[in-house]
Amino acid sequence: MSGFHNAVLVLPNELRPGGLCLANGLIAALEPHPNGFDCEGGYLLPGLIDLHTDNLERQASPRVNALWPSAQALLAHDKQCVAAGITTVFDALCIGEIGFEKSRHQTFLNGVADLTRLSALGALQAEHVLHLRCELPSPGMPAHLAAIIASPLLRLISVMDHTPGIGGQYANLARYRAMRQAEGFAPPEIDAMIEALQAAHHAHHRPNRADVLALARAHGLPVASHDDRTSADIATNARDGIALAEFPVSHEAAMAARAAGQGVIGGAPNIVRGGSHAGNVAVHELVRAGLIDALASDYVPASLLDAAFTVAHAATLSLPQAVALITAGPARLANLPDRGALAPGLRADLILVRLYDGLPVVRGVWRAGVRIG
């Protein structure tokens, strides 16, 4: 297949009826190919780029205490990402166990091994790379990061601290306790865990943060902060050379990140749901304020496309501007100049989308010009 015709091209600054010609896995020209794929009037977009998805962890542990075989979990995750139109996947694996998630370390070890093996075999349809989420209160975390830091698959590191009552997503202890009780944990067990987590935070957060930042600098890897709440958080991150603010939980933090010149990543599920499930800032409001550079799917791969069309439907942004939040924006933040837009010379990672009663549905997915979905 050497091209497309009868499409609506979602270009960086306009919608244009037409098609594409391809050559050697790249976009050769923004011209219809008469013998190419008939898009039947659907939208032709760049393949989506997801800078943060926890979906692999969810496939590996679909129920509490019900672990799924790791390789099969990765293959299922890959198929879900492709079905959602995501052609470049940053698999966000957590390093360091804290709290009630006791299987995360094994999921990390298995995920890295399977991703390395299955990528080399060509078994994965999307392109997968690693985003390692470093839980700063975890005592063994720096050693685990050091063991994987030289992997060619590692493209992004984030620093996070989910200590309840300290800051970030779980600053509100009453909300944290209610969440854990809803998961079936008893109040005495929750209180004991909060005490242990806060002690670990005070013992390990600062030295672990210094170790992670030093490793990232030594290997030239970008670092994102996570769940920032205050302008003081952002100032500390900027001082430490952190260039990305991932999922700021307040308008104050997002504004401070923009002022500091950081790239700001918002959660797409927050937009699709109409707000935060944890009582944090509404990402759609941050988009309206011009404070978001890219969206990430976080825990629902399909949320990327839904969020972009939600923003466009609300006339917050034009469709090309909204699509840029899930294509060109992530490509720029992740230093991927070969993809993220429909332009000659860029990789032919493409998705075909049609609307059904206003809902965007992926009808075809191509990676480097080869159909994968």
Image (cartoon, rainbow, N blue to C red):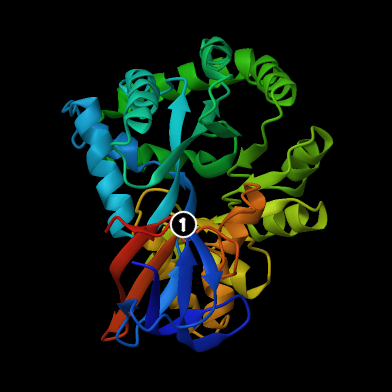
Q: Above or below — where is 274 with respect to 234? A: below
Q: Where residue 88 sits: x, y (%)? A: 45, 49
Write down the quadrant of residue 114 in the picture: top left
Between 149 and 292, which is closer to the camera in this rendering? 149
Residue name at image x 52 percent, y 66 percent = 27
Write down the quadrant of residue 356 in the picture: bottom left
Residue name at image x 56 percent, y 31 percent = 161
Residue name at image x 37 percent, y 18 percent = 109
Secondary structure beneath dot 1 equals loop
Position of 138 with respect to 362 (left or right) is: right
The crowding category of the residue bearing disc 1, from other C-alpha atoms within 10 Å (few below 14, some 14 to 19, many at least 20), is some
Visible residue check, residue 162 = no
Write down the quadrant of residue 206 in the picture: top right
Q: Above or below — where is 329 with respect to 112? A: below
The amino acid type of the residue labelled 1 equals: Gly
Between 137 and 175, which is closer to the camera in this rendering? 137
Between 168 and 152, which is closer to the camera in this rendering? 152
Visible residue check, residue 332 = yes
Q: Where residue 278 sits: x, y (%)? A: 44, 52
**Could you tell me which quadrant the C terminus lies in?**
bottom left
Q: Above or below — where is 329 with respect to 131? A: below
Q: Where residue 289 sits: x, y (%)? A: 67, 72
Position of 65 with respect to 237 (left or right) is: left
**Could you tell me which quadrant the N terminus lies in?**
bottom left
Q: Above or below — where is 168 with respect to 42? A: above
Q: How many marks?
A: 1
Q: Which residue carries the number 1 mark?
A: 25
Q: Where residue 348 sits: x, y (%)? A: 47, 61
